[in-house]
Amino acid sequence: MAGAYDEAKKSYECAHKIAISVSDKGLAADSLVGLGLTLRGMGRHREALKIFAKSRRIYKMSKDKAGLAFLLWAEAGAYRIKGDLKKAIQTFKQAISRFTAMKDKSGIGYCLCGLGGASRILGKTNDSFRYYLKANATFKGLKDTFGIAYSYCGLANATRMKGDFKGSLKYFKKAKSHYKKIGDRVSFAYTLWGEGTALKMIGDLKNAKNDFLKAQKLFKETNDERGLAYCELSLGELEFLKGRRAAAMPLFKKALKRAKDFSFGIEIKHADRLINASKNGKGFPFNLP
C-alpha cells in the first residue's frame, strides 16, 4: 500500500525460499500469491498470472479452500488490468462464491469492489454503484479502514461515470481522508486522479491539474506505470482543452507507449481514443472510467 514494491518483492521471494527449504507448502503458496500481487502492482500482470498458476497447484494439492478463494480474487484483479474484463468478472464471481461458503465477509467485500470496478469500465454504472455500496456497508460493519476507503473511492468513480461530477467529490473526499489515515500512497494517488477528472469535467482545470500533478508525483515515487499512463493522458487532455494541441499529442503518445510496453489493455484503448480525438478535435473532455 505504501508503494514499496521492490522491498515487498524481495521479502516475498525470501519467504518463498525459506518455505521451500523447510517444506512448508502453505507458506510456499502464500508467498507466491504475495509475490504475484506485488508484480501486479508493478504493472507486471503477465508475470503475476504465471506466479498465481504455480500457487494454484499447491493450494489444490493441499485442499486449501481459503487460499484458493484469495487466489481467485488476486487473479481476477490481474485479468482486469490486462483488459480481459469478462474473465475478471467471471473470476471475481468464483471467488465470491467461495468466500460466501466460508462466511468470509472481508473476502466478499473485496470481491464486490472488484466487480464494481470491472462493471464501471464496461459502462454498467448502476451495477458498479450497487456493488460498491454493498461493499462499503460490509467494510463499515467490519471496521476495515482500507476497505471503507477503497469502496468510497469506488462509489466516487461510479458516481462520476453517471455524470454526477459534483456528487462524486464528496466520496473522493471521504476516500482521501481514510487513505491518509493508513498511509496508502498508491490508492491515494488513484483517488487524486479520479477527483481531478471530476474537477476537469466541471471546468475547474486549475484544481484538476493540481490533482493530476500530485498523483503523478506519487506514481513516480511508487513506480506505478498504469497510474503514470493515466496522468499523462489527463495532463495531455488539459493541454488540449487550453488550446495547446501541439503539447497534448506527445503526452498521449507517451501514455500509449507505456500502456503497450506493459500490455495495459484498457489504457491502450483510452490512449488510442484520445489520440484519434485530438486529430479531429472532437469528444473533449473525456470522462475516462
Image (tube, rainbow, N blue to C red):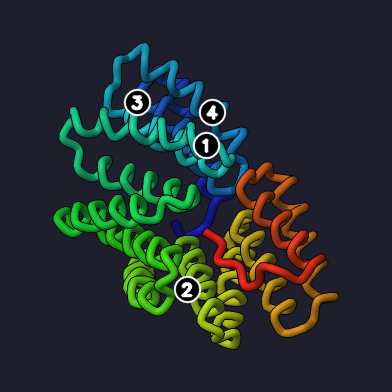
In the rendered view, tell whether residue 289 sits above or below residue 170.
above
Write down the residue under mark 1: 79
The percent position of residue 131, horizontal first and vertical second, equals: 30, 50
Q: What residue is at 40 percent from the left and 55 percent from the top? A: 125
Mark closest to the chain's N terminus, 3 or 1:
3
Binning the other alpha carbons within 10 Å of mark 3 as few (below 14), some (14 to 19) or many (20 upward) gives: many
Frontmost residue, 50 versus 10: 50
Disc 2 element: helix
What residue type is disc 1 on?
Tyr
Circles 4 and 1 in contact, beta carbons < 8 Å:
no
Disc 1 element: helix
Mark closest to the chain's N terminus, 1 or 2:
1
Binning the other alpha carbons within 10 Å of mark 4 as few (below 14), some (14 to 19) or many (20 upward) gives: many
Write down the residue under mark 2: 195
**Label 3 vs label 1: CA separation?**
16 Å
Q: What residue is at 61 percent from the left and 33 percent from the top? A: 47
Can you tell which of label 4 and label 1 is closer to the viewer? 1
Question: Residue 15, can we see it?
Answer: no
**Label 1 vs label 2: CA separation?**
25 Å
What residue type is disc 4 on?
Ile
Write down the residue under mark 3: 68
What residue type is disc 2 on?
Glu
**Label 3 vs label 2: CA separation?**
35 Å
Question: Residue 104, can we see it?
Answer: yes
Mark closest to the chain's N terminus, 4 or 1:
4
Can you tell which of label 3 and label 2 is closer to the viewer? 2
Q: What residue is at 38 percent from the left and 59 percent from the top? A: 154
Q: Which mark is residue 51?
A: 4
Disc 4 element: helix
**Label 4 vs label 3: CA separation?**
14 Å
